[in-house]
Image: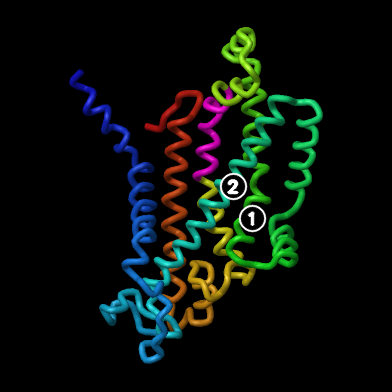
Amino acid sequence: MADRPHSRWAVFRSFELVAGLVLVGGIGLAVILSPWLFPDNGMGVNLLARLRAPFSDWSHILGTDPLGRDVLGRVVAGGRISLLVGVASVAGGAAIGVFMGLVSGFYRGVWDMIVMRFADVQLALPFILLAITFIAILGGGLFNIIMLMIVSQWVQYARLVRGQVLALREREFVLSARSFGVSNFNLIWHHLLPNLLGPVIVLITLNVATNILLESSLTFLGLGVDPSTPSWGGMLADGRTYLQTAWWVSVFPGLAILLTVLGLNLLGDWLRDRLDPTGRTRQ
């Protein structure tokens, strides 16, 4: 009984968990509070204060950009766009992929053939070619970027879930439920789905980080969100011509991307070890 308080907090002895929570939690809190911390979203133009170096003026701690806009305010405001794209696209892709994977793996037959052949075609398309075609037809913008990532990534979840369902559908607890007359819906919802969520949660965590990088890359190339909207990728693109004279314009949004992705990857590594079906944990 005396060991319970110790074991309750033992989970926080993991470096991946603590570091990931600190990084992601800190950035997430700053993004949530950004409307109150920076009411103008870093969009206030002041040509008299253009290209001020970091820490040279306490009203602009991280300096200003070529239009005199506060870099810190734009980095925090840009986090809202990047995190929104990462979370929304992963949620949409996971929902579609899990559903398709469940149907494909459970019912097999013609459903399995249709879903998997469609998935094979999807995987054969390079992402950059799909992105250029998608944006050329529908245009850029926040909503279209999210839809592009959903279309390009649902296959990962579908293939993962299908493999898990194929392994679980012949297990004893599933066969026992069938013998008691459990309906297909209840069998999927109450028996299969809870047992395959572990790998899906890990993939979701890692894909949020991946999609933040993709959004930043597409915006950097001019294929992403509206240039007038603060985003990390857009800030990198704006500052590339000033790298030798005003490095902070690009370095700080790049650092925000680095820390966010690092934190999400650390959380993903921790979840992968905790949800490892073989029961192995990292020491």
Residue 8 vertical placement versus 268 (above, below): above
Determine if the magenta segment contains residue 196: yes
Residue 155 vertical placement versus 147 (above, below): above
Q: Residue at x 53, y 71 (%)?
A: 234
**CA gap, disc 1 and disc 2:** 8 Å
Between 203 and 19, which is closer to the camera in this rendering?
Answer: 203
Determine if the magenta segment contains residue 212: no
- Residue 163 image point, x, y percent: 66, 29
Indicate which disc, 1 or 2, sits on the residue closer to the N terminus: 2
Residue 39: quadrant of the picture: bottom left
- Residue 7 image point, x, y percent: 27, 27
Mark 1 burial class by Cα count in 10 Å: few <14, some 14-19, many 20+:
some
Q: In this figure, which residue is indicated by the disc labeled 1?
A: 147
Mark 2 burial class by Cα count in 10 Å: few <14, some 14-19, many 20+:
some
Residue 181: quadrant of the picture: top right
Q: Say which amino acid is labelled 2.
A: Gly
Q: Main secondary structure of the magenta part?
A: helix
Q: In this figure, which residue is indicated by the disc labeled 2?
A: 92
- Residue 251 image point, x, y percent: 44, 71
Where are the magenta residues, as a range? 192-205
Residue 280 vertical placement versus 77 (above, below): above
Q: Say which amino acid is labelled 1.
A: Met
Q: Residue furthest bottom?
A: 48
> Please, what secondary structure does the residue beneath circle 2 have?
helix
Give the position of the C terminus as an image quadrant.
top left
**Residue 279: mark in rendering:** none
Q: Residue at x 68, y 50 (%)?
A: 151
Between 45 and 198, which is closer to the camera in this rendering?
Answer: 45
Residue 183: quadrant of the picture: top right
Residue 260 vertical placement versus 132 (above, below): above
The reply to whether the C-beta atoms of the residues labelled 1 and 2 are less than 8 Å apart is yes
